[in-house]
Structures are given as C-alpha cells and as structure tokens.
Image (cartoon, rainbow, N blue to C red):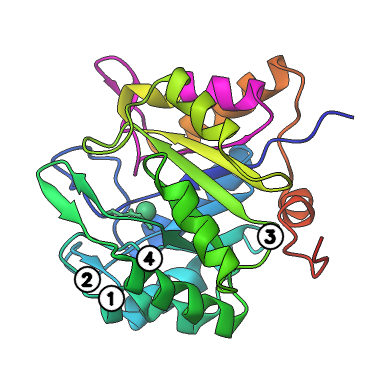
Amino acid sequence: MPEPVIITAALVGAELTRENTPYLPLTPEEIAAEARAAYEAGAAMVHVHARDRNGVPSQDIEDYRKIIEAIRASAPELILQVSTGGAVWMSAEERLQPLALQPDMASLNTGTLNFGEEVFSNPMPMVRQFARAMQERGIRPELEVYDTGMIPAALRLLKEGLLSEPLHFDLVLGVPGGAAGTIKNLLHMVESLPPGCTWTASGIGAAQLPITTAAILLGGHVRVGLEDNIYYRRGELTQGNAPLVARAVRLARELERPPASPAEARRILHLDGDKK
Ligand code: KMH
Ligand code: ZN
C-alpha cells in the first residue's frame, strides 16, 4: 500500500500583509475559515501563526487562544501545529508562548539564517531551550531545516536527549538566505536524514510546485499555503490556501499516493500515543 501524503497548510505566516495578497486571513474567524477550507480540500494539518487585532504578527497567548479555539470549532479533526518561529524581531520568551495551549505539534527551528534582509536568530542554546520546553509539555516538534547543516544540529539535540525518535523534519527550500529551492538540494537533504524519521518539504515561492511534486515522488509529505507562496501560477495570486491544497491532492493522487486524513496523519506522525 502506498504511504498516504500528509498535506500541511501554512495558512498565514508572519511576513505577509494584505498589500501582498488580499486573500491573507488575519482575524481568528478568517484564519479558522481558511483552516476549514484547507481541511475540506484535503489538508490534514495546519501550521498556525497568530495576528493581533491590528493584523500584526503576534505570539501572544490570548491571540493564539482565539485562533486555536476558532479552528478547533470549525475543523476539530485537523492536526494543529503552532509556530515557535514567530517573526524575526521576537524574543525567545515571546515565541514560546503558544506552547502553553498544548497544541498537537510545534515548529522547532534548528538554526540561524539570513531571512531575506533580516536575520532569523536561532542560536543553539535557544534551540535547546525550545526543545526542552516542548519535551516538558509532551508537544511533538517539527524540526524546521533551512540548510543542510541544520540536520546534524538536530541530531545533536537527539544525542543530548532533548528530542526523541522518530523525528519529524520540515525541509524548507527557497528562503532567501537558506538552501535554494531546487530538487537537487531536496535530494541531498533527504539523503542526509536519519533512518526511521518522517519528513515534509516546503518550497518557497515558485519552488512550491516542483518541491511539492518531488517530495511526493520521493515518499515525503508536503507543506503548501500562503505563508510560503501567494501565487497559484506565475502572475496569478492564489485565492486563499485551499487551491494550493487541492493542487497538492491532485498531484498526490496522480502519483498514486492518496492524501492522508488527519487520523492517518496522526498515525504516521506517532501523535496517537504510539511511540514507534
Ligand atoms: N516567520 C519566520 C521568521 C516557524 O513558523 O517556525 C519563521 C517561521 C518559522 O515562520
Ligand atoms: Zn511559520
């Protein structure tokens, strides 16, 4: 039986504004409606960033609480992954806040990189602090990897006992400052992963379509959505997250891998209490 593909929708992100795309959800109701549409299109998981009442990126626990409650009310089956990356200007303490809401998963950024014109700072002591915070709360991390050196960095944390197997990685390709969004880079990263892990791939901008396709072919899972890419095709904005999810579903089916339901995704990611 072919392994189902877990499709994650990265709904909002922290970099975009309505000037970039009018389809960006900002309020809890809008974000929950996008989550529901992504679920109906075939997503099993959502990667969530919060915005405050002015639409400004926020890691505030109350902003997250409203969004999480709204998503749980509109699509209770979805796997909920919060961001601990937040936005580039935020402190570690700010970024850690949504863990208190006991989401299913949280992103764990494994290294520092230039992020466009900014620096996304994740020094090793901070990465350890975040890993420990997730471990203490029993929240499963998704290890965000932006370049190949971040894979051995994650394995160091495993050796130190701050992570437990099986690990789950997100290979993010195409951030300006990280590894370029090429299939060659994806292949190299996949070959550098430890045995027994699971992985998803996120292609940024125009890399989303080829990276999604290659990840499905290589046996991985995929992340699509506005956080990573606002275009459906060159010059044409995507009208929300659902069209990108629907395309990933069609690609998966054509390539003879069905999209995973949230329940199947929980089994594959060992979120159902089964440790291995
Ligand atoms: N907004 C980026 C600086 C994550 O969610 O963990 C970081 C980010 C990664 O989006
Ligand atoms: Zn994010």
Relative image position of residue 56 (x, y in whole percent): 18, 63
Mark 4–mark 1 CB contact (< 8 Å)? no
Query: Circle 4 is placed at which residue position?
Result: 28
243, 248: nearer the viewer:
248
Instruction: Report x, y in % for residue 31.
Output: 40, 57
Report how far apart the C-alphas of labels 4 and 2 lie in the structure. Answer: 9 Å
Q: Nearer the viewer, residue 210 or 51?
A: 210
Q: Secondary structure at mark 3?
A: loop
Identify the mark nearer the N-term, 4 or 3: 4
The alpha-carbon separation of the residues under discs 4 and 3 comes to 18 Å
Is residue 36 visible in this depiction of the protein? yes
The secondary element bearing badge 1 is classed as: helix
Residue 21 marker? none
Q: Are marks 2 and 3 in contact (CB under 8 Å)?
A: no
Q: Determine whether 259 is above or below 133 in the image.
A: above
The residue under label 1 is: 92
Amino acid type for the residue under numbered disc 4: Pro
The residue indicated by pointer 2 is 53
Query: Mark 1 to mark 3: distance in Å?
Result: 30 Å
Query: In screen coordinates, is 36 left or right of 268?
Result: left
Q: Amino acid at mark 2?
A: Arg
Considering only order in the chain, which callout, 1 or 4, is on the residue closer to the N terminus?
4
Write down the region rendered in magenta. Answer: 210-239
How far apart are the two marked residues, 2 and 3, measured between alpha carbons? 26 Å
Crowdedness near tag 2: few (<14), some (14–19) or many (≥20) residues, C-alpha within 10 Å: few
Name the quadrant of the C terminus: bottom right
